Amino acid sequence: MPIYTAIIAEDETNLREYLSDMIKSDCPQIKLVATAKNGPEALDLINKHSPDMAFLDIKMPGLSGMEVAEKIDDSCKIIFTTAYDKYAIEAFDINATDYLLKPIQLDRLKQAITIATNKTNKSTITIASTTLHNQESLQWLKVAKNHQIKMLKISEIDYFQADNKYNSVMHQGQIYLLRMPLKELMLQLDKTKFYQIHRKTIINIEKIDKIIKKTFNMELYLKNNNQAFIVSRTYQYQFKQQ
C-alpha cells in the first residue's frame, strides 16, 4: 500500500489533536509528518517536508488557510477544514481538493483522502502518459454548488456549457459550476463519449435522446431534457463522423 505524507494546520489544540488521532488510527496510508498551529508555521512546514497533502484550517493566525494555499506548489493537495461553509467557492477557485466541515466525520475524512491520493496518482499517470501520447481520460470532476464542493462521476454528466467566469455542468437534473476552460476539459474527456457540438457546449452522447436535422443546422435533445442544443456548422462535420 502506498504511503502518503501529510501535515495538519489548526490553531485550536483540541481540534488539531482530534484530527491527528483520527488520521493515525483510521487512515494507515497517511503518514503525518508535522502539525502547525498557525499559518506561517504551516507554510514553513510545507516548504520543509513537501507533503502530498495538507489539512488547512481556513481561519488561522498570521496567514489564513487560503493564503497558505495560494503560496504553495500544486503538488501538495489542499484539504480545507472549517466550521463554515461560506468559503467553499473560494476554495474551489484556488483548486482545493476538498472542503471538510467541522466537526469532521470519519467517512468524509476518508473520502477526502481518497480524492487527494487519486489526484496524486493521476498527476504521476498524466506525466507519464502525456509522454507516451496516451493520456487516460478524466473519470471524476470537482464542481461547486451552494457553497459546497462535490466530486461528480464524468460518465453521469449530461453536458457542459461555457458561461462567463464559470462553466455549467448538468448532472442528474442539477446545475453545478466548473472552473476549467472547455478547451482544456475537452482534452481530458473520453472522445468516444463526449462530443463538442458548439464552441460553448460539450455533450455526453450516451444521454442523447434524438437528433433533428434541419436545412442549415442540427438540433439535439437529451433524455429527460426539453432543451434544444444546436450543433453549430463548425462542428457538424465532426459530429456526423463520430
Image (spheres, rainbow, N blue to C red):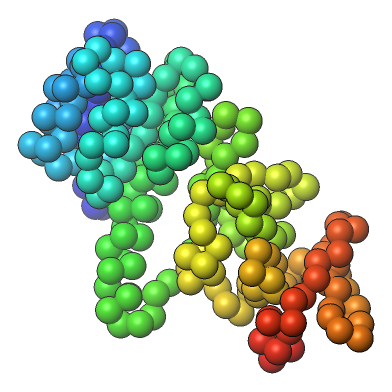
Q: Residue at x 30, y 21 (%)?
A: 64
Q: Nearer the viewer, residue 29 or 140?
A: 140
Residue occupying image coordinates x 63% and y 30%: 146
Give residue 91's position: percent from left, percent from top.
Answer: 43, 34
Which picture quadrant has residue 70? Answer: top left
Residue at image x 50%, y 55%?
180
Quick check: can you spot residue 238? yes
How many numbered marks are there? 0
Viewer-nearest residue: 166 or 1: 166
Q: Is residue 2 left or right of residue 135?
A: left
Name above or below for residue 212 compared with residue 59: below
Estimate the x, y position of residue 186 in percent, counting from the top left: 54, 69
Quarter containing the C terminus: bottom right
Residue 10 vertical placement versus 214 (above, below): above
- Image location of residue 104, percent across then percent down: 43, 21
Residue 229 lies, with reference to residue 2, above or below; the image says below
In the rendered image, the vertical position of residue 68 relative to residue 162, given as above or below? above
Left or right: 172 in relation to 88: right
Q: Nearer the viewer, residue 5 or 91?
A: 91
Q: Quadrant of residue 148?
A: top right
> Going by the image, does 134 lie left or right of 87?
left
Answer left or right for 186 relative to 145: left
Q: Is residue 17 visible?
A: no
In which quadrant of the rendered view does residue 10 lie? top left
